[in-house]
Image (tube, rainbow, N blue to C red):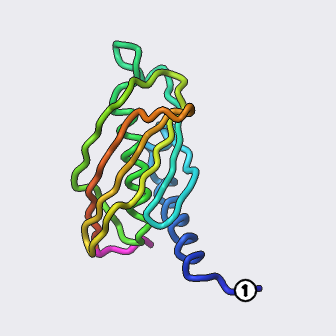
Amino acid sequence: MPAETHDETTAHRARQIVDQMMAHDAFSQWLGIEVLEVAPGRAVVRMTVRPEMLNGFAVAHGGIAFALADSALAFASNTCGLVTMTLESSVFFATPVRAGDVLTATAEEVSAGNRVALYDVVVTRADGTRVAFVRGTVYRTKQAHA
C-alpha cells in the first residue's frame, strides 16, 4: 500500500480539525449545519432555513446567512492547524432568504501571512442564486489544534 502523500495527510488533518470543532460547536449544530467539504484553506457547509429563523417580514434574519458564513469561515481558517479566530468580517446581503431555502456557504482563503489571513465566503441558495457575501480577516494564534 503506498504511503500517504503530504497533500493527503494535510487534507486528512484539516478534516479532523473541522470534525473536532463541529463536535463541540453547539451553535452550528443548532443551525443544522452539515459539513460537505474540507480542504486546507477551504470549507463548504450547508443548512436549511427553518421558520423560527425568520424575522417579522417573513424573511430569514440576516444573522442566519451570516452565521452560516461565519461557521464556514471558522472551519476553513482553522484547517491551517493553528487555533484561529476572526478579527473582523463584513457582509453584503444580495437577496432575501426564506424558510425552506437550502443555503450553502463556501469559504476560501484569499491571502495568508504568518498570523493574519483573509477569506471570502459566498452563500448560495440551492438554485445557485448568491444570497450573501462575507469577507473575513482572521488571526492565527500560536496554539496548535490538539
Q: Farthest residue toward the right?
A: 1
Q: Is residue 144 magenta?
A: yes
Give the vertical position of 11 relative to 25 (above or below). Answer: below
- Magenta stretch? 142-146
Give the vertical position of 30 relative to 99 (above or below). Answer: below
Q: Farthest residue toward the left?
A: 88
Give the vertical position of 59 relative to 145 (above or below). Answer: above
Q: Nearer the viewer, residue 7 or 16?
A: 7
Q: Quadrant of residue 7?
A: bottom right
Q: Is residue 44 magenta?
A: no
Q: State the image coordinates of residue 110 (x, y, percent, origin top left).
A: 34, 61
Q: Which residue is mark 1?
A: 2
Q: State the image coordinates of residue 84 (x, y, percent, origin top left).
A: 32, 63
Task: Give the amino acid type for the residue marked by disc 1 in the picture.
Answer: Pro
The residue depicted at 44 percent of the width and 35 percent of the height is 130
- Overall secondary structure of the magenta stretch? strand
Q: In which quadrant is the C terminus drawn? A: bottom left
The residue depicted at 31 percent of the width and 65 percent of the height is 111
Q: In which quadrant is the N terminus drawn? A: bottom right
Q: State the image coordinates of residue 127 (x, y, percent, origin top left).
A: 56, 31
**Circle 1 SS class:** loop
Q: Is residue 35 left or right of residue 89?
A: right
Give the vertical position of 99 relative to 106 (above or below). Answer: above
Q: Is residue 5 left or right of residue 116?
A: right
Q: Residues within 10 Å of mark 1 (few under 14, many from 20)?
A: few
Q: Is residue 1 left or right of residue 127?
A: right
